[in-house]
Image (spheres, coloured by chain):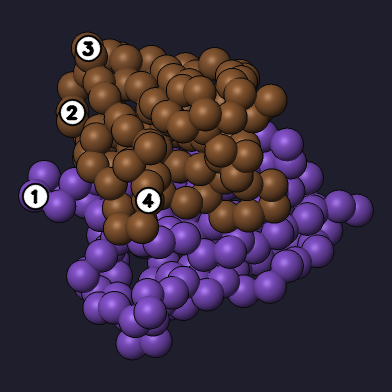
Chain colours: A purple, B brown
Amino acid sequence: EVQLVQSGADLKKPGESLKISCKGSGYSFTSYWIGWVRQMPGKGLEWMGIIYPADSDTRYSPSVQGQVTISADKAISTAYLQWSSLKASDTAIYYCARQYGSSIRGYYMDVWGKGTTVTVSS
Amino acid sequence: QSALTQPRSVSGSPGQSVTISCTGTSSDVGGYNYVSWYQQHPDKAPKLMIYDVSKWPSGVPDRFSGSKSGNTASLTISGLQAEDEADYYCCSYAGSQILVFGGGTKLTVL
C-alpha cells in the first residue's frame, strides 16, 4: 500500500526552528515528486513547493520562497519541511503529498499524508 | 501565481446534480490540460477525485466528472449523496512543476 506518514503535531514559540517529516512507503520514493501543502485555520489549500528526491531538485511557490526549506533524504525515503524562525502566521496544518510531474504522467497529487498540525504561540 | 476562483458554496438535494466552476488564466487553467479536483471532509486530508481535467483515479465513482472550456474548469457531481457533502478544491498546473489551488467550494447536500 502506498503511504505517506507524517510526523506528529508540534507546538512552538515564535522565533524557534522546526523541521517536520514525511516518510514514503509502498512505492519507489525517488520516482515521484513530493509536495507540501499548507492549510491555515479555516482556510483553503495552498501549494507550497515540491522536491524530487532522486536529485533534490526543488521548486517553491513565490509566496513561500525564502520562508521555508524543503529537503529529502532518499536513503530513508523521507521528505522534510523546515523553518529557521517561526512566526504565529505559520500556524497551520501541513500536508505532504505525492505529486506526478510530467507531460506524460500529468501534474496532480494522488496520495496524501494525514497532515501535521503546527501551532506557533507565545 | 494567484489562487484560482471558485464559488464559496453550492448546494443541491440528494439525487440532483451540481456543478462547481474554477476560473483561472491562460497561464494555468487555460494553458494546460492538467486540472485536478480534490474532496476534503472536515478534519481529513484531501482526496484526489479527478485529474488531467476529466480522468478518474481508481475507486472514484463516475458520478464525479470534470471538464474545461477556455480558462474555466468544472466539476459536476451527479446523483448527489449525503456523503458528497464536503469542501472541493480545484488545482491547475502553472508551469515549471508548480501547482495552484482554488479557494475551495463548500458543497451542502440539502
Mark closer to the observer (2, 3): 3
Question: Residue at image x 40%, y 61%?
Answer: A111
Mark 2 / mark 3, whichever is N-terminal: 2
Question: Residue at image x 37%, y 51%?
Answer: B60
Mark 2 → mark 3, Cα distance in angstroms: 10 Å
Where residue A104 is drawn, which disc sits there? 1
The crowd level at tag 2 (other Cα within 10 Å; few <14, some 14-19, many 20+) is some
The residue to which callout 3 is attached is B70
The answer to whether A16 appears left or right of B34 in the picture is right
The residue to which callout 4 is attached is B60
The crowd level at tag 4 (other Cα within 10 Å; few <14, some 14-19, many 20+) is some
Mark 4 → mark 1, Cα distance in angstroms: 22 Å
Helix, strand or loop at label 1? It is loop
Mark 3 → mark 1, Cα distance in angstroms: 22 Å
Q: Which amino acid does label 2 sit on?
A: Tyr
Q: In this view, does B51 lie above or below A116?
A: above
Q: In this view, does B73 lie above or below A18?
A: above
Please provide percent x and percent y for residue A43.
Answer: 66, 34
Q: In this view, does A119 lie above or below A64?
A: below
Please provide percent x and percent y for residue A47.
Answer: 46, 42
Mark 4 → mark 3, Cα distance in angstroms: 26 Å
Q: What residue type is labelled 4?
A: Val
Q: Mark 4 lies on which chain?
A: B
The residue to which callout 2 is attached is B32
